[in-house]
Amino acid sequence: MARIATTVHGLGSVHEDELTLLDVPYPSLEAALTAGESLQSLAKAPVRERRPLDPADLRAAVSAPSKIWIVGWAYHDHRVETGREAPTGEPAVALVAPSSVTGPYQPVRLPRVAPDRVDYEGEVAVVIGSTASDVSEKRAFDHVAGLTVANDVSARDVQKGELPGWPANPSMAKSFDTFKPLGPAVVSLDEAGDPADLLLRTWVDGELRQEARTAQLIWSIPYLISHLSRVTTLLPGDVVLTGTPGGVGQKTGRYLKAGSVVRVEVQNVGAIENTVTEPGGVEAA
């Protein structure tokens, strides 16, 4: 049983309100997983320091995955609210830029080019622990390090091709900087409980917008891992976002704006909370 977080002080084990910093040589969790470590082996590493857990010290659970796969329309109620038919084949998937990753309590920044229809998608995320290529559903969990919490932030006008001059591009819509908060820790499967029946909830400014259980996923987590492993080799530290339930802002036009606070919570795994900020970055000359 393990909860491993990436912090400004290095890798640490999280227990309630305490952070145990680990005496390990790895700069990131993905580096540790690539070296053959597991969450359980990291949790048994020598202790460097114990200190109170300060959310401000936490960074993205996985900072630089080689790939982020996202799964679209994975819950029936989300398919209904977006006008999709019942699935007749494989899941809709897309690759998202790893540079979109941000921390569990860091700001989500509205993109300068598309600030008006930015939406939230609370999700359960799977972190790959060991190389997976063409694996079966039965063996899929053998390649999973653990679970974490994600918000699959999306610019809907970019996604749907409704931004003037921009073609529809779901991958780009979800790849803007800061659009993939991950955290607060990666939790081992024995600690998280049954991955097939976890409660997922999303609040915006204190209002509950999404509530579902992973039992309602159209495609199970092992199926998704097996399917994706037959397309690309999944590497240690890669992340799979398993899909979002109904209740997104797209249905009602209630999009995020500067000052909005989005909280996503997954039973037994943890919660992330991100404040939306005005567009930033460097403007073109």
Image (cartoon, grey):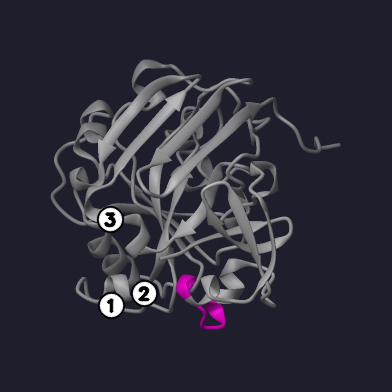
**Magenta residues, as a range?**
33-40
Tell me if residue 36 is in the magenta stretch: yes
Pointer 1 local density, CA inside 10 Å: few below 14, some 14–19, many at least 20: many
Image height of 154 relative to 227, above or below = above
User: Given this view, does label 1 or label 2 mark the residue nearer the observer?
Assistant: 2
The amino acid type of the residue labelled 3 equals Pro
Q: What residue does disc 1 label?
A: 135
* Residue 264: quadrant of the picture: top left
Q: Quadrant of the C terminus?
A: top right
- Where is residue 218? Give x, y as percent: 19, 48
The amino acid type of the residue labelled 1 equals Val
Q: What residue does disc 2 label?
A: 143
- Where is residue 103? Give x, y as percent: 61, 47
Figure label count: 3
Picture residue at 65% right of the left edge, 31% below the top: 113
The amino acid type of the residue labelled 2 equals His
Q: Are marks 1 and 2 in contact (CB under 8 Å)?
A: yes
The answer to whether residue 87 of the structure is visible from this angle is: yes
